[in-house]
Image: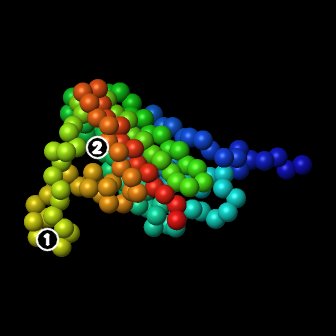
Amino acid sequence: MNPSRPADRPVEAVELFIPPLPEYLQLVRAVVGATVGVGREDELPLDPGGIADLRLVVSEAVTNAIEAQWSIGANDRILVRCRPDQKQTVVEVVDRGPGFDPDLVPDLPPVEDEERLDYESGLGLSLMKRLADGTVVETGPGGTIIRLVVEYP
């Protein structure tokens, strides 16, 4: 008898509650990358480059969450929720920082523009919008939710 392994069953969601510390970024990246395609009978829905892009945008969102919480001295855990299905993966990053106005985040100059070198921060949201198929920001004084959607080809 060969019982079905739990990993062979569809995954509805994986949730991580992490301290607001950069040491946990690699854990989040590894879990999100491994979750893509779990429970699928066919091949992985994203090529290695697509998985790397997903891991990068999630890392940026979690880094922003960590920095937001540090800015007010909040030690609440950050929630990272990954929901894969047959058509896409949705990742949500929820923090308890002060919130921000996404409309006030400036658009960055093109990569080939020398002015781009003047920007040492503020790249995260731009990367998320460029690499994810959908980026939704819900923010207020009690925190921020970043929802990233990566659709499968």
Residue at the location (64% across, 65% down)?
43
Q: Report the front residue among 56 and 103.
A: 103
**Element assignment for label 1:** loop
Residue at the location (42% across, 41% down)?
92
Residue 21 in sight from this viewpoint: no
Quarter-of-image position of residue 97? top left
Residue 150 horizontal side relative to residue 136, left or right: right
Residue at the location (49% across, 57% down)?
151
Mark in front: 2 vs 1 = 1
Residue 59 horizontal side relative to residue 12, left or right: left
**Element assignment for label 2:** helix
Q: Position of residue 133 (x, y in %)?
A: 40, 57
Q: Residue furthest right?
A: 1
Q: Position of residue 141 (x, y in %)?
A: 24, 27
Residue topped by disc 2: 64
Residue topped by disc 1: 113
Q: Residues within 10 Å of mark 2 (few under 14, many from 20)?
A: many
Quarter-of-image position of residue 113? bottom left
Residue at the location (28% across, 35% down)?
139
Q: Position of residue 102 (x, y in %)?
A: 22, 43
Q: Report the front residue among 56 and 148.
A: 148
Residue 49 in sight from this viewpoint: yes
Tag count: 2
Disc 2 vs disc 1: Cβ atoms closer than 8 Å?
no
